[in-house]
Image (tube, rainbow, N blue to C red):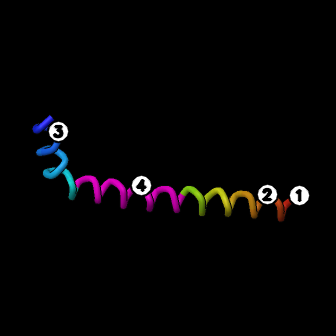
């Protein structure tokens, strides 16, 4: 348990990095889907 807490403290920067990348990736996916849906609705 202490090891987990120590690991959590050590990986705080890594967690922030991964959460930031995840948010960025999620925004890109939403943007891409929105663009694809927009093109599909325009073409039909």
The structure residue drawn at horizontal position 17% and vertical position 39%, both measured from the top left corner, is: 4
Q: Are marks 1 and 2 in contact (CB under 8 Å)?
A: yes
The structure residue drawn at horizontal position 59% and vertical position 59%, both measured from the top left corner, is: 30
Q: Earlier in the sequence, mark 1 or mark 3?
A: 3
Q: Which residue is mark 1?
A: 44
Q: Are marks 4 and 3 in contact (CB under 8 Å)?
A: no
Q: CA distance from mark 2 to mark 3?
A: 48 Å
Residue 22 pos. (x, y %):
41, 54
Taking the image as shown, residue 43 lies to the left or right of residue 29, namely right
Taking the image as shown, residue 17 lies to the left or right of residue 39, namely left
Q: Which mark is residue 29?
A: none
Q: In the image as oriented, which residue stretches furthest toward the top?
A: 1
Assess disc 2: are there few (<14), some (14-19) or many (≥20) residues with their C-alpha within 10 Å of its C-alpha.
Answer: few
Q: Secondary structure at mark 3?
A: helix
Magenta residues (range):
14-28
Q: Earlier in the sequence, mark 2 or mark 3?
A: 3
């Amino acid at each position: 348990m202490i090891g987990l807490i120590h690991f959590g403290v050590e990986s705080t920067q890594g967690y922030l990095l991964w959460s930031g990348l995840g948010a960025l990736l999620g925004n890109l996916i939403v943007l891409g889907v929105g663009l694809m849906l927009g093109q599909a609705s325009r073409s039909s």
